[in-house]
Image (spheres, helix red, strand yellow):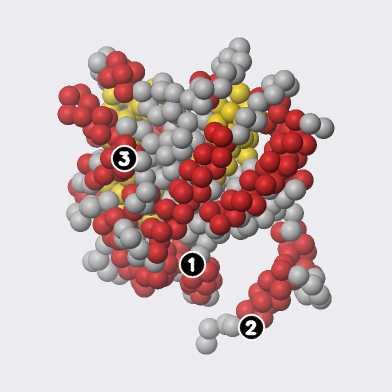
């Protein structure tokens, strides 16, 4: 019989976390108390880092699978959950119009990107990996771990890879792969993928799409034409990474890596005399650098995608469109308000901005961040090039190459409905700082 008594303890812990703090076993009491020290990541008034609550069905499915605790490394440890992983990954691949591919889930985007760059290095040994200055720092770190040569390509004033700079570097040769970021973690910028793919035809390198954050926006119907054009070309990439534990409504950690050419599976080939003997079917560990992985992550993803299919015009896509609409709305309000210096127009759902005043944008931004947090509006701060803020027509001192700005990640669909409240608190916090 499956053990169910611990559900009572879980229910008690959840009730204590929510309200009451009644008697519980000491270890769960202390756990609930400690969890209150987090920021309210689940709430729309948290608009700081990339933290989004998993869908209730994902939480329930994950918890259900935990009673079995399957391991998706080999079929012996996760027969049902391995099949569910293959089905869930196939739906993600279809989202990018891939029917023939190699792919699997990972513990997160970092591991997924590591696998993609490792495969690139196997196909072009000794050649350099390129990514933009605003690409996630994990790419440089991964190259260090894999002992690959890495170079950063300059960005334009909208935090996208500068195609002219890329072409100049490519002309010197020795490049094995270019990482195109579709949704940078700082600003949500989308690299010009069509132009990068055109250069591939000329210079012959692999194109890896790091769509860990932005990949699901391929389903959104309200992107700007240039951004939509970039996503339309993802199908021509050589590899893709996407994180279901970001916009895919999954618990951490759940990443996914896809390869357009299934033949790259030969690089993973290895033998396990005690693991793979039970079945001639594909064991997921045979196409993964990771060994043990939680089958519960696959179960949660499968259940969520059954409820919310990855299709344009569907409920899941509507949630992404709400996030994008909230970001456009906030950026529009910032442009009309003389207290702020907005950055460039958001491509996805991330907005960056600073405050205008005699104390200096960096100092004011930090103070507004603290004042807003005191009112339970949680934003983030970021250090970005000053030139990213030259689009509004507001003159700012450019004596330093970077400034500390405010950053808002509006990745919950509810942010659209809460934007009036967010704006009111931001406005009050700004007034407090500018007119103490």
The residue that mark 1 highlights is 58
Measure the alpha-carbon separation of dots 2 and 3. Answer: 54 Å
Q: Which one is in front in this view, the residue at disc 2 or the one at disc 1?
A: 1
Q: Disc 2 or 1, which lies upstream in sequence?
A: 2
Q: Depth check: 13 or 431 in front?
A: 431
- For the question of whether residue 267 can be seen, the reply is no
Q: Quadrant of residue 128?
A: top left
Q: Disc 2 or 3, which lies upstream in sequence?
A: 2
Q: Residue at x 31, y 65 (%)?
A: 87
The residue that mark 3 highlights is 225
- Secondary structure, mark 1, is helix
Q: Residue at x 22, y 26 (%)?
A: 199
65 horizontally vs 173: left or right: right
Q: Residue at x 25, y 66 (%)?
A: 281
202 horizontally vs 102: left or right: left
Q: Depth check: 72 or 304 in front?
A: 304
Work out whether 427 lies above or below 320. above
Q: Residue at x 43, y 35 (%)?
A: 189
Measure the alpha-carbon separation of dots 3 and 1. Answer: 33 Å
- For the question of whether residue 21 can be seen, the reply is yes
Q: Depth check: 52 or 37 in front?
A: 52
Percent coordinates x, y for residue 386 in the rendering: 55, 21
**How many residues crowd around disc 1 within 10 Å: few (fewer than 14), some, or many (20 or more)?**
many
Percent coordinates x, y for residue 123 in the rendering: 24, 34
The residue that mark 2 highlights is 5
Q: Which one is in front in this view, the residue at disc 2 or the one at disc 3?
A: 3
């Amino acid at each position: 019989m499956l053990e169910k008594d611990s559900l009572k303890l879980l229910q008690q812990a959840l009730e204590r976390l929510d309200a009451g703090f009644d008697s519980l076993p000491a270890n769960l009491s202390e756990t609930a108390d400690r969890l209150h020290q987090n920021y309210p990541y689940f709430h729309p008034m948290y608009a700081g880092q990339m933290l989004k609550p998993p869908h209730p069905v994902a939480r329930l499915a994950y918890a259900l699978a935990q009673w079995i605790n399957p391991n998706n490394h080999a079929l012996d440890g996760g027969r049902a959950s391995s099949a569910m992983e293959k089905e869930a990954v196939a739906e993600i691949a279809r989202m990018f119009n891939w029917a023939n591919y190699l792919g699997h889930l990972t513990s997160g985007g970092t591991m997924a990107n590591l696998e993609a760059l490792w495969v690139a290095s196997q196909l072009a040994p000794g050649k350099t990996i390129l990514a933009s200055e605003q690409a996630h720092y994990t790419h440089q770190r991964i190259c260090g771990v894999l002992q690959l040569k890495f170079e950063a390509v300059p960005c334009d004033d909208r935090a996208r890879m500068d195609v002219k700079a890329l072409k100049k570097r490519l002309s010197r040769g020795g490049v094995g792969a270019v990482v195109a970021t579709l949704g940078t973690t700082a600003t949500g910028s989308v690299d010009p993928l069509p132009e990068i793919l055109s250069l591939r035809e000329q210079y012959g390198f692999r194109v890896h799409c790091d769509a860990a954050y932005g990949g699901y926006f391929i389903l959104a119907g309200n992107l700007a034409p240039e951004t939509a054009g970039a996503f339309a070309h993802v199908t021509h990439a050589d590899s893709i990474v996407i994180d279901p534990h970001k916009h895919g409504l999954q618990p951490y950690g759940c990443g996914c890596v896809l390869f357009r050419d299934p033949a790259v599976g030969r690089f993973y080939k290895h033998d396990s005399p005690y693991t793979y003997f039970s079945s001639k079917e594909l064991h997921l560990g045979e196409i993964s650098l990771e060994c043990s992985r939680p089958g519960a992550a696959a179960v949660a993803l499968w259940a969520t995608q059954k409820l919310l299919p990855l299709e344009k015009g569907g409920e899941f896509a509507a949630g992404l469109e709400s996030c994008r609409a909230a970001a456009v709305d906030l950026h529009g309000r910032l442009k009309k308000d003389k207290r702020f210096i907005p950055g460039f127009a958001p491509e996805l759902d991330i907005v960056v901005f600073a405050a205008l005043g005699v104390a200096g944008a960096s100092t004011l931004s930090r103070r507004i961040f603290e004042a807003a947090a005191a009112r339970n509006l949680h934003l983030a701060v970021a250090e970005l090039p000053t030139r990213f803020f030259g689009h509004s027509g507001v003159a700012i001192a450019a004596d330093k190459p970077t400034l500390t700005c405010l950053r808002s990640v509006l990745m919950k669909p509810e942010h659209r409905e809460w934007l009036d409240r967010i704006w009111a608190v931001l406005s009050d916090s700004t007034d407090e700082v500018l007119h103490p």
